[in-house]
Amino acid sequence: MVETDQLKARLTQLDCLPQQVKEVQRKLEQEQESSNKAWELYEGAVAEAQQLRERLTQVEDEAKNSGARASKLEQAHADAERARRSSVDLLEARTNELREAQIFLTKIDDVSDNEVVHIVETLNAQVARIAAAVSRAPQFQFESRKDAAVVEKAVRRIEHYAWLGPSLVSSLRAADPARNNSLVQTALQAGMVSYARWLATSWEFGVMDPRGLLEGVYMAIREREPQSVAGRWRALCRTHVKALLETGEAQTQRLFKTLAGIVADVLVIYGASGTWEDVSDVVTQTFERDLHEVISLALQFQWTAGEKIVSRDFSVFAAEPDLAFDPLSMQDERADQRKTTASIRKGSVLCTTHLGLLFERKSGGKGGSGDVDSTLLLKPKVVLRSGLGKTSQVASGRVAT
């Protein structure tokens, strides 16, 4: 019975087996289908991976190429920036050069010839007025008997700087104040004119260039360069030389003491009583403002002609002592103005009492060549040696202008 039941159960199992086989077969088919799909997916993934690898390689190549292009662009940018900076620097340098060169271009000066003439005429008139006032000043007493030692020291100072010519010094030294009361006025005028001329034409007031090297350099430049270049060099040189000098009140006092000393020396040589210090003190206290005016006018000319004017040259000058009188280039202060030119007397120059004024301009020429054109704007007024005997004709109260 038991066996029968087992057989039945076995038969039942066998009956179910085909169904199970089918089920397994169905599952296998499903698995196979899934496996096929998975394989297809795998093959797709492999293909996609291959494509991605190829794309990655392409992107890497493009990235490398882009990096190279970027490097080239950066290099090109750097080169362009350097070129730009170089151009900017060159432009700035050329601009500065043009700006500097523009300084040397010829331009119209804002000072007329008449203004320069007026300065010199005013200076001459001031010197003549002071000379007359000093010679008549009641503070000074003149004696025929002179202190030889005091006179000798004054003569040495005058002769050392050549403020007066030897003939005038000898005449002044030998003069009798009681008989020739106008000679001292002439000598005072000549001494102040000589100092004013030096001051008006000086480049550095005798401080650092006693041999006149700067003026010599300028003359060499003017000979070889255009007027605009030479004139600007002169103006710049004089301006910057002054920056190295003592200026202001200290310089003015030094110049004033020199001029006052010249006046005192002339008075002492002529026979002013007292010591040199006494005479110098009276000159300083009584005529300080007047002598400062002479210095101011001389410095005004020195600045105007030396630094402010570029396109031409102005210079004040005096006739050299003992030079033969030339009516074309000088004027005899004591000649009778009613005489004709043909009757003007001949003689040699004793001294200059009024400064002359000379105008010069270099004409244009290739490479700086060209002639220097000169014009005499003011003749210097002179006293002739032959006029010594007629000094009494010039009253001490009459001032020549």
Image (spheres, grey):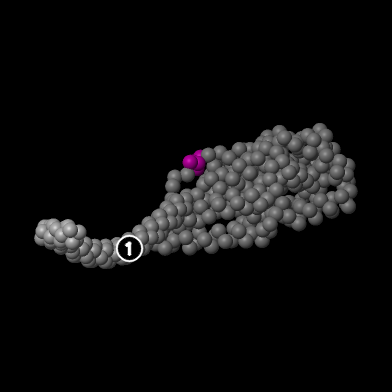
Q: Residue at x 75, y 36 (%)?
A: 287
Quadrant housing the N terminus: bottom left
Q: Residue at x 47, y 60 (%)?
A: 225
Judging by the rendered image, the residue that carries numbered circle 1 is 67
How many numbered discs? 1
Estimate the x, y position of residue 174 in percent, counting from the top left.
Answer: 81, 50
Decide which of 313, 21 is in the foreground and name it: 21
Q: Is residue 397 visible?
A: yes
Q: Is residue 127 left or right of residue 102?
A: right
Look at the image and say whether residue 113 sits in the magenta stretch: yes
Q: Residue at x 25, y 65 (%)?
A: 53
Decide which of 136, 121 is in the foreground and name it: 121
Q: Amino acid at mark 1?
A: Gly
SS label for mark 1: helix
Look at the image and give the residue range highlighted in magenta: 110-114
Estimate the x, y position of residue 343 in percent, counting from the top left.
Answer: 56, 48
Estimate the x, y position of residue 310 in percent, counting from the top left.
Answer: 50, 49
Q: Is residue 120 left or right of residue 248?
A: left
Mark 1 residue crowding within 10 angstroms, few (<14) / some (14–19) / many (20+) = few
Q: Main secondary structure of the magenta part?
A: loop
Decide which of 36, 199 is in the foreground and name it: 36
Q: Is residue 360 above or below residue 249?
A: below
Q: Is residue 74 left or right of residue 242?
A: left
Look at the image and say whether residue 143 sits in the magenta stretch: no
Q: Residue at x 43, y 62 (%)?
A: 369
Estimate the x, y position of residue 172 in percent, counting from the top left.
Answer: 77, 48
Q: Is residue 189 visible?
A: no
